[in-house]
Amino acid sequence: MSTAYVVTALVTVAANAFSGFAAMTRLGPVMRVLSPALARAGVPESWLVWPIGALKALGALGLAVGLAGVPLVGTAAAAGLVLYFVCALYTHLRVSDFSPQFYLAIAFLGLAVATLALDPALLLDP
């Protein structure tokens, strides 16, 4: 397992775990910024626990399990996070919402793509 993969995966785990926790608990400082963005994108706040928060938290958990020794779970989690953030970006784009959350979703997508691209379970040995 390369150092680049471990570091990227740990950053992705931390970012998604915090984001999922903040969404599920409706953390005050986050909600001040997130509520208007949800309204602009047409996403109900009731979705913060499921699917938004739970999927981010489960993605983080899956990546952690992958780092702990079950590589294919980590691969599936990284792929799931890529799909999640592609859908999040589409949700913002369809209503022309270019709020800070749009750019944050791009950053989260980049982390998920980097984690998937560096995943040792996808490397083929000749």
Image (cartoon, grey):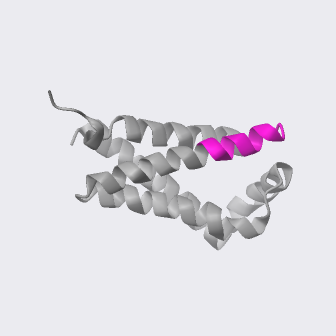
Picture coordinates of residue 30 (x, y %)? 69, 60
In the rendering, at what x and y percent does residue 31 appear?
73, 62
Q: Is residue 76 magenta?
A: no
Q: Position of residue 38 (x, y in %)?
A: 79, 55
Q: Residue at x 61, y 41 (%)?
A: 86
User: Does residue 99 show up?
Assistant: no
Quadrant hosting residue 85: top right
Q: Which residue occupies the extreme bottom position in the image?
A: 25
Q: Residue at x 36, y 48 (%)?
A: 75
User: From the viewer's perspective, is 121 left or right of 24?
Assistant: left
Q: Which residues are magenta?
A: 86-99
* Residue toward you, 40 or 25: 40
Residue 88 is one of the magenta-drawn residues: yes
81 with respect to 95 (left or right): left
What count of labels does the image hold? 0
Foreground of the two, 24 or 33: 24
Residue 95 in the image: above or below residue 68: above
Residue pictured at 64% horizontal, 68% vertical: 50
Evaluate whether residue 113 shows in this view.
yes
Q: Residue at x 26, y 58 (%)?
A: 70
Query: Looking at the magenta stretch, what is its main secondary structure?
Result: helix
Which percent across, then down, holds residue 82?
Answer: 52, 44
Give the quarter of the figure containing the C terminus: top left
> Would residue 12 be found to the left or right of residue 95 on screen?
left
**Quarter where residue 36 is shown:** bottom right
Q: Residue furthest left?
A: 126
Quarter the N terminus occupies:
top left
